[in-house]
Image (cartoon, rainbow, N blue to C red):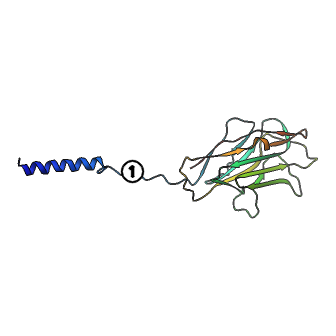
Amino acid sequence: MTLTHKLCSGSAFLLLAALLACGGGSTPPPPPPPPATALAYTDPTTGTYKLVKNVSSSGSHLVLDLVGPSTGTGSGVSITLSADPRVTWVDVPPGGTTALLMQNGTQFTLGSGTPIQKAKATGGVLQVTVAQKAPTAAASLNGPLLRVAVDLKSGLGLAQGTTLAITADPAKCQVLDGTGAITPITVTVGTLTAQ
């Protein structure tokens, strides 16, 4: 083997080693996953008053029902919820002609005329109240008491699986029970993620 042949072979070996050390010859990294476009919600497994996913939820529009305990009666409920800034409180039936940030559930009978039903969103905070008018008999709390909805804000580029938060303010959640007493309640919220 000639000196020139040895030098060329050695140079080729060094070039190959340098390319491999710098990542040459390796496959490019996979592209990042597409950004999240939907919301996933896991219902809480414990609690007396719970926010659970309504079957009308779809894609980036999550509808949540406040479900009461299996026993007891009441005439109304008021809750205050805070949402992650990457979601927004929206009308329960999307695209409606009137602003309806909440709906009555299936338990309370609101009667005729103007119902006692109000929702107000300020930034990420939603205040909701619904109640029966006297002298309507107290209703069972065992079922959906009210319904609210959040949408994932678009254009954020969130990674799929990003955890988002909805919390209930324990100082501002109350039920008007069957005896007419206003009683504090604890609302348990599930896990919300971007998908």
The residue most toward the left is 2
Q: Nearer the viewer, residue 157 or 55?
A: 157
Query: Residue at 77% across / 51% down in the picture?
Result: 127
* x and y percentages locating residue 157 in the rendered image: 54, 56
**How far across and how far down the image is residue 46, in percent?**
69, 35
167 vs 53, nearest the viewer: 167
Seen at 53% across and 54% down, the residue is: 35
Q: Position of residue 23 (x, y in %)?
A: 31, 49
Determine which quarter of the picture holds residue 42: top right
In which quarter of the view is residue 122 placed? bottom right
The answer to which of 113 and 159 lies nearer the viewer is 159
Residue 26, position as x, y percentages in the image: 31, 49
Q: Is residue 73 left or right of residue 102?
A: right
Q: Residue at x 74, y 51 (%)?
A: 126
109 on left or right of 169: right
- Identify the image quadrant of residue 113: bottom right
Crowding at label 1, few (<14), some or many (≥20) Cα neighbours within 10 Å? few
- Amino acid, disc 1: Pro
Which residue reaches farthest right?
Answer: 135
* Residue wearing tag 1: 29
Question: Circle 1 sits in a helix, a strand or a loop, which is it?
Answer: loop
